[in-house]
Image: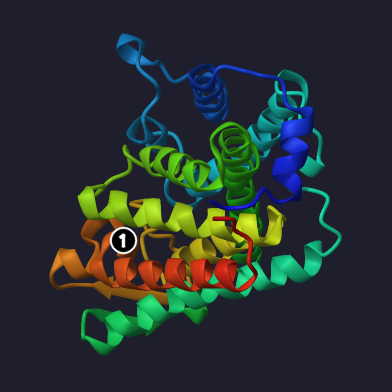
Amino acid sequence: MLKDNYSIKETKGSQKDRNAVVLVVLLIILTLVPKFLLSFILHVQIEDGRFISQESLSHHLSGDILLLTNLYSTILTSILVYLLAKYYLKRNNSSLGLKNPNKIKNYLKGAFIGLLMITVAFLLLKALGLTKSSYNFKNIKVLMFIAFFIGWVFQGFQEELLCRSVLMNYFASFNGVASAIITNSLIFSILHINNPGFGVLAFINIFLLGSIFSLLFYISDDVFLPAAAHSFRNFAQGNIYGINVSGISKSETTLIRTKISGNPILTGGLFGIEGGLITFIIELTVVFILISKIKRNKNYIY
């Protein structure tokens, strides 16, 4: 049994007792608000009462502009999630992992972890002859590249605020840390279920990735560490190595153009390398490393 860290103790001390299903539904609705607003602005008709699809948006916004629009829309989602945590759950900033005094140091650690994980996966695929790469420096628009970097920073923070700060500590306050890590990681994986190329291995890998971010949050007690790992991992995939990010189409603004071929079980197919066996091995290794760190720190009780 894992000990409560400071943010979980703060959650127990400040949080109102709210229904878990209602909370999850509310959070999912908040993630859809920017998409509805965008559809309204673009006068896109939503047929049969269904949510606007990525395909519908692509008729109005294409390529990198569409991706950037989605990334920057997470700013609004983050604000809405924070307000829900503050006023509906009555959570304070400490309970959300927003008050750690070592934010900059932790953010740099997270950035290194995120870059390292995806770089190892990329190099292993290259060593196995499953990728063909070419440099794309001459075609890079610097302002666009910077815009993507900032966009991924916002996107990674939003998902970590929702899944780790709010949901993980919510579940931990009622059912313990281990159960909370599993539950929020399952929700994190389910949130990707409509992404192109999503399959069983992708589901498992996203669950493992959620577990890694959860363990990083638990160990550091600082949401900025997993947020950095999340953001820099996605940024490196999409705009350094030129790989699909969770099934999202490749960006044209990438330092390296990469074509992946071979067995989709190894490469992840349309979903990208996040859905492949190489990533599974790497993520499972990282999970064991983080669990070992928790044991060394004696952050558990029998």
Q: Which residue is mark 1?
A: 272
Query: Does residue 253 show up?
Result: no
Q: Going 26% across and 47% down the picture, which residue do you hit?
A: 198
Which quadrant, please, contains the C terminus? bottom right
Position of 171 relative to 3 (above/below): above
Residue 293 falls in image quadrant: bottom right
Residue 131 point in image, percent of width and height: 26, 79
Q: How many marks?
A: 1
Q: Going 57% across and 23% down the picture, which residue do you hit?
A: 37
Task: Identify the residue at the far front of this view.
Answer: 302
Residue 278 point in image, percent of width and height: 28, 72
Residue 70 point in image, percent of width and height: 53, 41
Judging depth in this view, the residue of 30 and 3 nearest the camera is: 3
Q: Going 38% across and 16% down the picture, which residue do you hit?
A: 46
The amino acid marked with disc number 1 is Gly
Task: Identify the residue at the far right of this view.
Answer: 101
Judging depth in this view, the residue of 278 and 50 nearest the camera is: 278
Residue 173 point in image, percent of width and height: 63, 35
Q: Going 28% across and 45% down the picture, which residue do you hit?
A: 196
Residue 72 falls in image quadrant: top right
